[in-house]
Amino acid sequence: MAAAVAVLVAACAPGAARAASSFQVGAAKVDVTPPSTPAAIAAADGSAFALCPPGLDGPRPFAFEEPYTDLNGNGRFDYGDPATGAPQEPYCDANHNGRYDGIFVSSGVNQLAAVVHDPIDVRAVAFSDGARTVVLASVVSQGIFNAYQPDESLGTKDMRARARRLRPGITDLIVSSNHNESSPDPIGIYGAPDAGGTLPAGANSGVDDYYMNWLDDRVAEAAARAYDDRRSATLWARQFRTPSNLYVEVHNFPTTADNEFQPRAIDTKIGLLQARDRGGTPIVTIMNLAAHNQEIGHSDLVDPANGIPLKREISSDWPGYFHRGLESRIPGMAMYLVGENGSEEDPSTVPPVTAPECGPILHPEYPFYAQRTDGCYPQAAATGDAFAAAIAAEAPQAQRLRFGSLAVARHEFDVPLENNGFRALAVAGVFDNRPSYTGGVYAGRAGRDLRTEVGVLDVGPDLQLLANPAESFPALMLGSPWGIEDAECPNRPNPAVPTWHARATYRFQAGLADDLIGYMIPAWAAFSSPELYTVDDCHSSRHGHGLDSESVGPTASNAVADQLTALLDKEPDPTAHIRLGRFVLPDGSLSRRPEGAVGVWLADPGSTSLDPGSGQVVALSTVAGFGTRPADSHGTFMDYDGAGEASADILTRGMLVSDCKGQASARYYVNVYPALSGAGSLGPSSAQTPARGCK
């Protein structure tokens, strides 16, 4: 049976400090760049590799790479190539894990790091209410498992345990990877040699256990330093749309329609959270954004400064430039916190840069929002600096958050490993020794299930952090305009939408948090090769996507959404109502898409029909009704966070009804996915002049 653990931090443990009347916040950053100095390499040789035999003198740029003999003289370790008869080079397996431990970059199979272009780090923020302290850490990494060994001696659980040992006052630690693909491989698929097959992966794991052990210590150290840095603070938050000089590339259903430049379920909001000390000086400024971090890692270019492929360079990519750019503009530490970035790819400037070293502009036939250059540092720098300028400009407009207690809730559960390709990689040890389970019992590498977790952090009454262990699609976390007619697997259920169940004014998404189990897509949208999944009762692949091949499976996707929703439902928004329905256009016709709508028609609770005279019609204040049907109430449109909007657009998920004091009395989230009987036209809208107001 799946392990289910729900941990809700209580009001105050015996002996804990009396709750304060204001928040305390501390911030710290710690370098996690693989050590590359001669002294660091010599130190490793004198400790981790002290028992290795002499003569293994192949070049090693980094301390955490096992000694080897460079037989072919190319300056790096090679497993050999049976096709050409090239032998595997001798190496010292000092930790006896059966593979070569080296710094493989998360940019592609068999890309051993050659140099450091710019440093990578972990940034941590400690939030305290006087009785408890929760640390949020963002690591420059593609994604870190919750455990790499049966004893959980590596991974985010171990980071949490080490942080608590350093500072027993740390109540909890949430670790989010920012999905950087120019950093050491933390998941194993980028090892060597290329295994071929359906999934791109190396035949041996690319995880370097020496580096991961060191990384655990570095993250714990950052948490401890943030804890020590706490001082009285106020919190300020704001959310705003991505400015016109920036865009995030999107593609793949259900984020887009079949044409990748037709977005449907996306997240264009930027979250800003700032802590200020007693004098009003920023301590830390966090940018929460749904985007990838692979400008450099996915590049096919060569660094003109050294002739090395960019794929083999360690870099913090555009978030590093964002950090440095923001810290040059305003005081305090900057942090990029990745959101629900499934199919929300690299951001870029509008227009893209035209530096000679950036190569051609891709998609020149499309408008600027769909153009980008081949990955290069000038583009990464321009993108990061543009985000820094936007955050610096918006920060003074942030709203102060009310003080309140901190609470963190976690739920641990098992999900089936349905992806046959992932199952084969797990058995082969590509994912290191990540524990697997069958029926809740540890089963080595060959179990049926993986254990993962979701979490919610409440920071007072106005801010909630929703932590999911994946690259979750916006359609999963925020809802979408797609219906069952669009589903590739309509036999699979439609999951709950977690964000609709949150209660705080500000709802920040923390992606790749405390684990990584791949892309998470609503189960009805996931269709891939029968080699990878059982696809009985699914239609043939009708949409342009393939990222479900990099997922644990559709059941896990729905479980992540449903379990996160269950945590949020412990303290629901009393004004929230999630109803089946449709958006109503000015001519009275019904639509699943919100753009251009002037109202919504909600089915009666428990009903799956929109028969004449049934349900509830909520319209804009300028609309009296539709045909002969008067509006039952009036309101404004709202986005997926329950925040009011001036008009319906791609982020709209329902309608907000307020009282005469401007306080929300009802938030109607519209679930458009199911088929509804009787859903015809209401008749043309009729104007209400003057617009309906309070009486």
Image: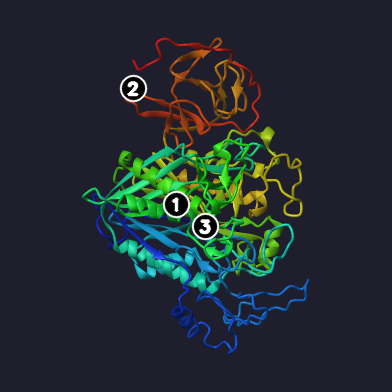
Q: How far apart are marks 3 and 1 (CA)?
A: 12 Å
Per the rendering, the mark at residue 180 is: 3
- CA gap, disc 2 to disc 3? 47 Å
The residue beneath circle 2 is 660
Q: Is residue 545 above or below residue 100?
A: above
Q: Say how the picture is coloured.
A: rainbow
Q: State the SS at label 2.
A: loop
Left or right: where does residue 531 sit relative to residue 214? right
Q: Please state, as top left, top right, bottom left or bottom right, where the C terminus lies in the image.
A: top left
Indicate whether 103 appears above or below 542.
Answer: below
> What's under tag 1, amino acid-wise?
Leu
User: Residue drawn 51% across and 60% down?
Assistant: 141
Give the image location of residue 203, x and y in percent. 69, 68
- Residue 670's x, y, as percent? 54, 30
Cα gap from disc 2 to disc 1, whole angstroms: 37 Å
Rendering coords of residue 558 (x, y %): 60, 46
Q: Nearer the viewer, mark 2 or mark 1?
A: 1
- Is disc 1 placed on a helix, strand or loop? strand
Q: Which of 690 and 668 is in front in this view?
A: 690
Residue 337: mark in rendering: 1
In the image, farthest residue toward the front: 356
Q: Quadrant of residue 150?
A: bottom right
Q: Which amino acid does label 3 sit on?
A: Asn
Q: What element carries label 3?
A: loop
Badge 3 vs badge 1, beta-carbon distance below 8 Å: no
Most foreground residue, 474 or 251: 251
Q: How many marks?
A: 3
**What amino acid does circle 2 point to?**
Cys
Other residues around mark 3 within 10 Å, as few (<14) / some (14–19) / many (≥20): many
Q: Earlier in the sequence, mark 3 or mark 1?
A: 3
